[in-house]
Amino acid sequence: MFIDTHCHLDFDQYDEDREQVIQRAIKNNIDAIISIGTDIHSSRESVLLSEKFATIYAAVGIHPSDSQDADETMFRQIEEMADEKKVVAIGEIGLDYYRMYAPKDVQEKAFRAQLRLSKKLELPVIIHNRDAHEDVLRIALEEGIDDIGGVFHSFNGSTEFLDEVIRNKFHVSFTGAVTFKNARYENLLERVPVDNLLLETDSPFLAPMPFRGKRNEPGYIKYTAEKIAGVKKMPVEELAQITSANARMLFKLTD
């Protein structure tokens, strides 16, 4: 029914009960989960998880906050991992001008290198964008990624930026933050076409109400879906069907 297109099941928050978390997700009608890499180690761990569990797929990449030491050797390792059967995307890649763990020029170099890898391998991208709206979209378009496709995960831009992202044929996804009291997502949720929409948890982060402040997990995605469906004035089952079809098409997921 649901597909969680973005979580981090390799993180140590799941070390004590990872298999149970995955089983709970299956019981909560999660048909597929994409575990996302943020560096070489987490990318490799995500690949291993995809090999162990039928419902899990992997994305491999170097997060902008981990790009300080990224070099050609690392990019070759990402390319080698991307050749694994259940790797479905390059990510999580992009720009982060909020935390600034790496200088802008270093982040851009890593971003461009991985966008080019995405194009070479014909794999979609999973884009991290924090306070870098103009640059992240400009660079993606300069590298021709609109021909490959991808998703702006945990979308938090303006309606104008959303329009630009959609106009250039990208998908967007939202986290459990849309369920928070006083969260200002309604305009974005109303505006985004369902054909460009994906669901995600970004587990272990951003758990939806009523679990806010606790560890998130894929099985909680239904709360985000219910909120979005309510704003869209459509049955949650219909939203699940459409967003899952979107995910299967973008990431070429197999049953």
Image: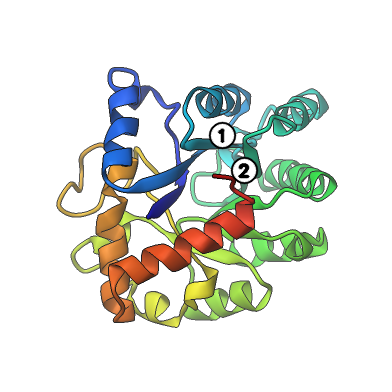
> Which residue, as the protein is rendered here, is positioned at the far front?
255
Residue at the spot 31% in from the left edge and 48% down from the top edge: 29
Q: Secondary structure at mark 2?
A: strand
Q: Nearer the viewer, residue 75 or 232?
A: 232
Quarter of the image where one finds residue 14? top left
Estimate the x, y position of residue 21 in percent, counting from the top left: 30, 31
Circles 1 and 2 in contact, beta carbons < 8 Å: yes
Q: Amino acid at mark 2?
A: Gly
Estimate the x, y position of residue 205 in percent, counting from the top left: 34, 42
Residue at the spot 63% in from the left edge and 67% down from the top edge: 170
Which of marks 2 and 1 precedes in the sequence?
Answer: 1
Residue at the spot 76% in from the left edge and 47% down from the top edge: 118
Q: Secondary structure at mark 1?
A: loop
Quarter of the image where one finds residue 84? top right
Which image quarter holds the N terminus?
bottom left
Dot 1: few (<14), some (14–19), or many (≥20) neighbours within 10 Å? Answer: many
Q: Is residue 209 left or right of residue 247?
A: left
Q: CA distance from mark 1 to mark 2?
A: 6 Å
Residue linked to disc 1: 37
